[in-house]
Image (tube, rainbow, N blue to C red):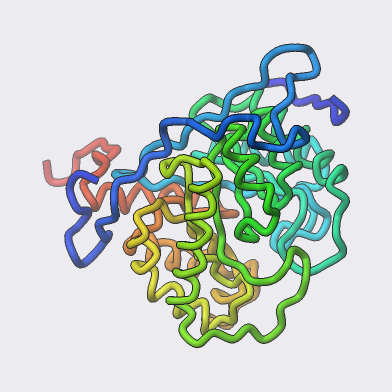
Amino acid sequence: MNNAYDESAADRPPLSDSTLARTPETGLDAPQGVPAETVPAAEQPAPAADGAAPPSPRPLPGTSRRVLVMGIVNRTRDSFFDEGRTWGLQAAVEAGIAAAADGADLVDVGGVKFAPGEALPVAEEIDRVVPVVRALRRELPARVLLSVDTFHAAVARAAVEVGADLINDTTGLSDPRMAPTVASAGASLVITHSLAEPRRPYPSPRYDDVVAEVRGFLAARLERALEAGIPRDRIVLDPGPDLNKSTVQTLEVLRGWQEYAALGMPLLAALSRKDFVGESLGLPKDERLEGSLAAAAWTVQHGARILRVHDVAATVRMVRMLEVLAGWREPAGPLVHNV
């Protein structure tokens, strides 16, 4: 592979009632969007610089009998877990290639962390993520899809133009242009529950019924995305564990996970190394792998079908075992024990 990069340029219910819960079958096929003329010109896809048509967004695989693993690549100096280890362009691209080699189905590239902080100019965010996406679209096998973690429609548009398939909006459509932009581009969208304005603090969050309120938020944003023209089978929902939620509130969200599965959409669980794991076990972030895997398995049992993680290889093994137990996947073998 070329490592020099130019920065300028459900059939059967899985394991019945005691294990993996049945969820509605949802594939992300049928790419259709709203007519381009309904989207502001600044948000419409533009031709590639060399005159070639931009790469088309690819649909996510069906998740009725599999769980997808999304590897995280943060091109930031202050990311929560990797703390800048993938800040450099080549380091970020190599991290995406490594995630794919470890079995990731998707690679999620982010240029701004969720936590409060100073706003990053949109142009700078584009400069961080677009070269990574462009390089990964060229380097990765076709089975590995590309996601971009952003809350700016302009960043989403620029990312899709160079090969992004999925936009992961952790602010629940805070940018009113996001849903029309994704629809026009024919991409898929993750809608996440969070309450704060982007990069703004939200101290001591309060909920009367956190499970019901998160469900209501996701249902409302789902309708907004549908009204914008994004097909149902290109939308994923994320209840947002830890995002503007305390550990106790996040644990309630996880215990009520089936309520979100009842919305009939694929669910993404972003749990990896998060504070609720650390506070539940009394552990620092570098010792939270086992707790993260346990929380991920819990959500899969209750309907999650995409796991966004830092530890791809360990998560893929856990997922494969769950799929074998569910009867979704044959054992890898060789089957020699007591044969």
The C terminus appears in which quarter of the rendering? top left
Residue 131 or 120: which is nearer the viewer? 120
Q: Would you say 126 lies left or right of 245 here?
A: right
Residue 298 or 193: which is nearer the viewer? 193
The picture places residue 31, in percent across and down from the top left corner, at: 47, 31
Residue plotted at (66% across, 33% down): 160
Residue plotted at (88% across, 28% down): 8
The N terminus appears in which quarter of the rendering? top right
- Evaluate whether residue 99 shows in this view: no
- Evaluate whether residue 30 shows in this view: yes
Residue plotted at (41% across, 51% down): 266
Reply above or below: 80 against 91: below
* Residue most extreme to the top: 51
* Residue most extreme to the front: 37
Residue 113 or 194: which is nearer the viewer? 194
Reply above or below: 90 against 204: above
Residue 108 or 240: which is nearer the viewer? 240
Reply above or below: 197 against 142: below
Residue plotted at (41% across, 41% down): 233
* Residue most extreme to the left: 339
Q: Would you say 89 lies left or right of 10 here?
A: right
Reply above or below: 50 against 83: above
The picture places residue 11, in percent across and down from the top left corner, at: 20, 44
The picture places residue 18, in percent across and down from the top left corner, at: 21, 67
Q: Looking at the image, how many numbered discs can be counted on the residues?
A: 0
Which quadrant of the structure image shows residue 3?
top right
The picture places residue 124, in percent across and down from the top left corner, at: 87, 45
